[in-house]
Amino acid sequence: MREFWLILKQAFWTKAKSTAFLVTTGLLIAGIFLLVNVPIILDRVSSVTGSDAREVVAVIADDATFAALSERSNASEEEPFEWVHVPKDEAGDAKARLLEEEWDAYVTIDERDGVLHAAYATTKMADAMKPRVVEEALQSIQTERTADRLQLKDDEVGALLAPVVFETKNVSPSAKSEEELLQSSVLVYVLMFVIYFAVIMYSSMIATEVATEKSSRVMEIIISSASPVKHMFAKVFGIGLLGIVQLLLIEGAGYIAITKNKQLEQYTELVDFSAVNGWTIAYAFIFFLLGYFLYATLAALLGSLVSRTEDVQQMIMPMTLLIIIAFFISVFGMNNPEHAIVVWTSYIPFFAPLVMFLRVGLLDLPMWQPLLSIGIMIATIVVLGVFGARIYRGGVLMYGPSRTLKDLKNAFRLGKE
């Protein structure tokens, strides 16, 4: 076991001390803090550059409508723009004045047959908030005027506009509460992306590391003192440990950035998993670890078949496609976790890390279903490990162009000798 631990430590520390790893981790952490604090940064930049001036929206309407609109919207206090009343006979060519940037937008309001008609104009591609404020305020004015015309009392108007009381309830004894379902959905999303990127990034790292050692002939020296099997699994565990450390650093930075930002206080409950069932969190770690070891073992096997690092990506492309398919199935299953495709693929080992955890997080499954999926994954890892160790033993001694299927056969034959 001494050789195993030496190779594991070498795989971990070589990558951990590399400039690429340190720079990548630093940039990811810095990017998280930057993204979370973008509103604060923009506000400060605007205050320094003086670009935080309120936008002007001209209201071309009669005095009564404009007064009612201002009263209903409270835009002068709550919204980052201000209303300017322009009588209809003084509006002139409103479009020209807008294009000359006298206004940032304008709205023309008329009343025909007791119904308000409004036309909003702007030169900006993304301008959704102001029209929504205008529409909501005008709807309130329309309701009030219609009630006055029909001589309805306030309580009658309230009764007319009262929303229906609609409640859904799951009577299953093990049903998830709404809060627990929300937290589980967030956890599922987080794990989906973590597994997806971890498998692609770290599996590629393992395959590249093996191919690099093989192409530089260092592999021949290593396997003379340690068996190829020990070397393979030491690489898998070493890079896996490095990945866990990097993910903990990134997730810790994300948690701190979100919880310390006062503007995101209403969203901090999304990163508080106290309402999630303990089994759901346990399954999250189990499926993450099993998913990593499954794909990492496969990546090490494939990496041993190539003699040049330039061929690594081509060799591991089928493996990458598997995790991409699993990711898309999981995204589809977020809205329909009981679909037949989601159910059946949750038992396929290469899809199970994402798809079965999706079902565990969003549904109340019988215990045997996730345990069956976990058992299939463990059995697959064992078979892949035994088969892969033999392929690896022969593959590290093979040089020349890679031909995938033929190389597998040759590596397996060499591994038995």
Image (cartoon, rainbow, N blue to C red):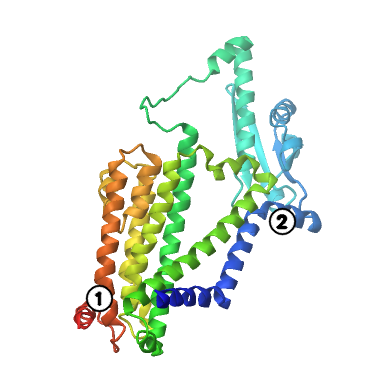
| 71 on left or right of 345 | right
Residue drawn at point x = 51 percent, y = 20 percent: 163
Classify residue 80 by image quadrant.
Answer: top right
* First in residue order: circle 1 vs circle 2: 2
Q: Nearer the viewer, residue 279 or 247?
A: 279
Q: The C terminus appears in which quarter of the rendering? A: bottom left
Asked whether the beta carbons under mark 1 and mark 2 sit within 8 Å of each other, the answer is no
Can see residue 349?
A: no
Callout 1: SS: helix
Mark 1 to mark 2 CA distance (whole Å): 55 Å
Classify residue 318 by image quadrant.
Answer: bottom left
Residue drawn at point x = 63 percent, y = 50 percent: 258
Classify residue 299 by image quadrant.
Answer: bottom left
Q: Residue 376: image x %, image y %?
A: 26, 54
Q: Nearer the viewer, residue 48 or 328?
A: 328
Q: Residue 383: image x %, image y %?
A: 24, 64
Callout 2: SS: helix
Q: Amino acid at mark 1?
A: Arg
How many marks the image carries: the answer is 2
Q: Nearer the viewer, mark 1 or mark 2?
A: 1
Can see residue 91?
A: yes
Q: Name the residue beneath numbered marker 1.
A: 390
Query: Does residue 282 lie above or below 194 as drawn?
Result: above
| 30 on left or right of 352 | right
Q: Residue 48: image x %, image y %?
A: 80, 57
Q: Amino acid at mark 2?
A: Ile
Q: Name the residue beneath numbered marker 2.
A: 41
Q: Nearer the viewer, residue 125 or 315?
A: 315
Circle 1: is it few (<14), some (14-19), or many (20+) Cα within 10 Å?
many
Q: Residue 253: image x %, image y %?
A: 61, 57
